[in-house]
Image (spheres, rainbow, N blue to C red):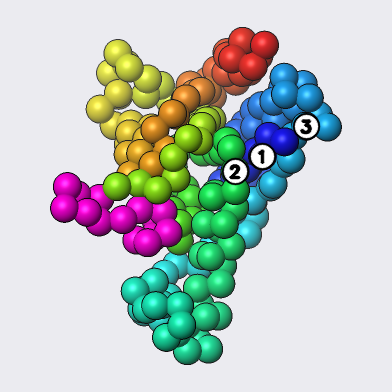
Amino acid sequence: MSKLLVINSSPMTDNSNTRELVENFVNAWKIKHGESEVSVVQRDIGRTPPPHLDEVTIGSFYTPEDARNDAQNQAISLSDQLVDELEQADAVVIGSPMHNFSITSSLKTYIDHVARVGRTFNYTDNGPVGLLKDKQAFIISARGGRYGDGSPAAAMNHQDTYLKTVLGFIGIEDVTTINAEGVSSGDQGVQTAAAEIDTLLA
């Protein structure tokens, strides 16, 4: 059974390019792998954003499980659930609209909840080592302008670079990006991204 974790981070519920493309991806994934052989977990952090980390939650991250108090257990429960979903997934697809040259605030708080020492990475004598090995990740983005390699604004693209860095940090190094560029100028970028999905999962 192929387990696919679907993360939508767009705050838009209607007319969202990333939601449309992610849905295309999921449908194509089911066809490629056999619908009866695919388990899909939906995590919509655009509609239901994780809370920002607070002092109690951060403290609970660094407190051994058997030493946490009730408040810490409650504070860490969502983070545990999000990490469990990542651990159990074979592949992850992330719908990520560009906001101010980077990712949405909800996706940033999600990352803060899942980048956890002892759960998704460990510190070693040779530096930090990611623990979520042998997984694939697919980043599906939409951008009003053009920020791809070779474009005049490429240096302002902190979306792909940040997500690839974070995913690699927790051990997910097999990362594919599919970018809908220039969506404020028309639907050509979305059509191009949709065609890339079809080719990728043909």
Q: Nearer the viewer, residue 109 or 165?
A: 165
Residue 5 on image: x %, y %: 62, 43
Mark 2 or 1 closer to N-term?
A: 1
Viewed as shown, does residue 174 lie left or right of 156? right
Q: Are marks 1 and 3 in contact (CB under 8 Å)?
A: no
At mark 3, the secondary structure is helix
At mark 2, the secondary structure is loop
Mark 3 or 2 closer to N-term?
A: 3
Viewed as shown, does residue 162 lie left or right of 57? left
Residue 96 on image: x %, y %: 51, 38
Disc 3 crowd, CA 10 A, few/some/many (<14, 14-19, 20+): few
At mark 1, the secondary structure is strand
Q: Identify the residue position indicated by label 3 in the image.
A: 37
Residue 57 on image: x %, y %: 43, 75
Residue 46 visible from this viewpoint: no
Residue 182 is tagged as none
Three-letter code for the amino acid on which mark 2 is drawn? Ala
Start-end of magenta stretch: 115-128
**Magenta span contains residue 29:** no
| Quadrant in which the N terminus is drawn | top right
Residue 150 on image: x %, y %: 30, 13
Q: Identify the residue position indicated by label 1 in the image.
A: 3
Three-letter code for the amino acid on which mark 1 is drawn? Lys
Residue shown at 45% from the left, 77% from the top: 65
Residue 95: image quadrant is top right
**Magenta span contains residue 125:** yes
Q: Identify the residue position indicated by label 2 in the image.
A: 89
Three-letter code for the amino acid on which mark 3 is drawn? Glu
